[in-house]
Image (tube, grey):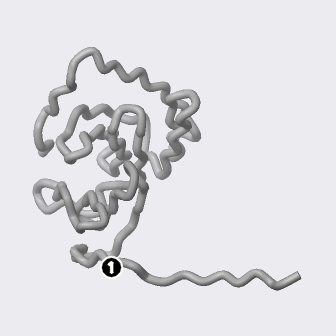
Amino acid sequence: MDPLHFGITREDVFKNHASVVTHLIPLRKQSFASVDETTIRLWNRHGEQHRYTFPKNKRGMVSSIVYFHKADVILTAEVDLTFKAYTDSLDVLEVFHSQGKVQHLLHIPTIDAVIAAGESGAQVWQFAVKRARRQQPIGRYE
């Protein structure tokens, strides 16, 4: 039996970040989101598609980020003790408060839930996504 060989080659480089990338998540087919100290960016193979820069020169806002494929919604846990739901073009849909600092989010698509882990232990958040009409973003949150 021949031994297995494993190899990878670099296909693309995405260089628009001004500081260290702290989070990466897959989005729809062949797209992803990245987070650095000041900005959330959405990318595809053609490069950066959208960006959201945190207001008032805030830095290191995102502690965790997940993507809901079913609703095309990006959810972040942020250091200001909020969760923010963003559209796939990074407009803010909703802002709600957490019960302590959240360090990690884990999306469980089979039950449409998120486990938020942090200062308050691990909490399961159940999300009901209603698509009766197109949700309108509340705009850029500041």
Q: Residues within 10 Å of mark 1 (few under 14, many from 20)?
A: few
Left or right: residue 54 versus residue 1 is left
User: Which residue is painted at 14% across and 42% down in the image?
Assistant: 141
The answer to whether 44 appears left or right of 68 in the picture is left
Amino acid type at circle 1 is Val
Asked if residue 1 lies left or right of residue 99, the reply is right
Q: Nearer the viewer, residue 124 or 87?
A: 87
Image point (37%, 23%), residue name = 129
In this view, which residue lies farthest toward the front?
1
Q: Position of residue 135 (x, y in %)?
A: 21, 26
Provide the residue designation for mark 1.
13
Q: Looking at the picture, tell me which residue is in the foreground, 6 or 142.
A: 6
Q: Quadrant of the N terminus?
A: bottom right
Camera-nearest residue between 118 and 73: 73
Please, what secondary structure does the residue beneath circle 1 have? Answer: loop
The image shows residue 101, relative to residue 17, as above or below, that is above
**For the point 33% across and 33% down, which residue is it?**
97
Q: Is residue 123 left or right of residue 99?
A: right
Q: Quadrant of residue 24?
A: bottom left
Please identify the quarter of the rendering in which residue 51 is found.
bottom left
* Residue 34 falls in image quadrant: bottom left
Q: Point out the image quarter for the C terminus.
A: top left
Percent of width and height locating residue 37: 28, 67
Q: What percent of the width, then of the height, locates residue 36?
A: 30, 67
Image x and y of residue 119, in percent? 51, 45
Residue pictured at 43% horizontal, 40% vertical: 100
